[in-house]
Amino acid sequence: MAFEESRRDNICILTLSGQVTDQEMSELADYVTGLIGGTEAMKVVLDLGQVRWLNSMAFGVLTGLLQRLRKASGDLKLANAHDHVISVFVQTQLIKIFDLHDSVDEAVTAFLAE
């Protein structure tokens, strides 16, 4: 898995691509954790459009990132998730804590509306 970072209105957008491995999810967690600590709230959008599946560790890492960001007065929104990934969020009840959007634009707009 690789990820690219872009910024829009002080919102960090991370576009993930490729196969997601445990090591790479750990690297993503370290990267996002490194972003936390600035003077302003960290708002992150993860674009999952190029990710076909996530394993259980990936869901655990995402949950941990969400908690760390919220503790630092930030937040995490997910965008472009494929139906299979969304179905796992629904089955595991994680849909209740994660904010999923159909597109990056929708996620950014949601942040700007807060």
Image (cartoon, helix red, strand yellow):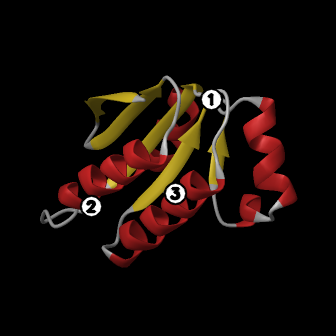
- The residue positioned 80% from the left and 35% from the top of the image is 84
Q: Nearer the viewer, mark 2 or mark 1?
A: 2
Which three-letter amino acid code belongs to the residue tagged 1? Asn
Viewer can see residue 53: yes
Residue plotted at (65% across, 46% down): 100
- Residue 101, given in percent of the width and then of the height, sits at 65, 39
Mark 2 secondary-structure assignment: helix
Determine the image quadrant of residue 34: bottom left
Q: Which residue is mark 2?
A: 33
State yes or no: discs 2 and 3 in contact (Cβ < 8 Å): no
Residue 39: image location, x then y, percent: 12, 66
Residue 65: give x, y in percent of width and height.
43, 63
Is any atom of residue 113 visible in this view? no
Which residue in the structure is indicated by mark 3?
62
Residue 55 is labelled as none
Indicate left or right for 67 with 88 as reference. left
Q: Position of residue 15 (x, y in %)?
A: 42, 28
User: What residue type is disc 3 on?
Assistant: Leu
